[in-house]
Amino acid sequence: MIVFDLQCGQGHRFEGWFEDSRGYEDQQAKSLISCPVCESTEVTKALSTFGIKSSSPKPPAGAGNSEQVTALRRQFSEFLDTHFDDVGCDFAKEALKIHYGAAEPRNIRGKSTSDEEKVLKEEGVEYLKFPVESKPESDS
């Protein structure tokens, strides 16, 4: 998929999602693309701010402030610990049980394999995947 910034003859800007560049060209030639505001089919590609490279890259806001990043990671980890049940390697099984009503709905977190994630996607189970740092094992 590719996203183009588009603009109609009246100046309305909007996005268009296409299979590829040729898909855009084919739809444009058949006047199938129209402005969602005024329904004009006089539509052209607009310059995208994401496609314009600046002469000197600016560092992201807060870049280099490892103390803030560390604090945010700690807060996020605490939030997960407090509000989500850790089901470990049974994440996919538990997510499917919740999805099909065999288990009570609740927030869960855990680990899954690529194959398990494929099954979840095929079954229509929504989930959010993100890396989490492992906690060191305590000696107590």
Image: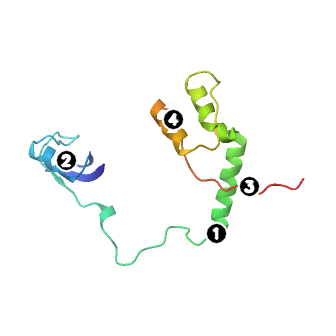
* Residue 40 in picture, x, y percent from top left: 13, 42
Q: Nearer the viewer, mark 2 or mark 1?
A: 2
Precedes in sequence: disc 3 or disc 4: 4
Query: Hey, what amino acid is under mark 1?
Result: Ser
Residue placed at 14% from the left, 40% from the top? 32
Identify the residue under disc 1: 66
Say whether disc 2 or disc 3 marks the residue closer to the N-terminus.
Answer: 2
Q: Secondary structure at mark 3?
A: loop
Q: Is residue 8 visible?
A: no
Nearer-N-terminus badge (2/1)? 2
What is the CA distance from the residue labelled 2 to the residue labelled 1? 44 Å
Q: Earlier in the sequence, mark 1 or mark 3?
A: 1
**How would you rate the neighbour count of disc 1 (Cα within 10 Å): few for under 14, some for 14-19, many for 20 or more?**
few
Q: Position of residue 98 (x, y in %)?
A: 60, 27
Q: Seen in the image, is 6 located left or right of residue 128?
A: left
Q: Quadrant of residue 47?
A: bottom left
* Foreground pick, 51 / 137: 137
Residue drawn where x is 56% and y is 68% of the image: 62
Could you tell me how far apart the alpha carbons at marks 1 and 3 are, in whole angstroms?
18 Å
Q: Is residue 37 above or below residue 11?
A: above
Please name the residue that numbered disc 2 is placed on.
Answer: 23
Kind of residue sitting beneath label 3: Lys
- Residue at 33% across / 71% down in the picture? 53
Q: Residues within 10 Å of mark 2 (few under 14, many from 20)?
A: some
Left/right of residue 36 with respect to residue 129 in the rendered view:
left
Residue 131 lies, with reference to residue 98, above or below; the image says: below
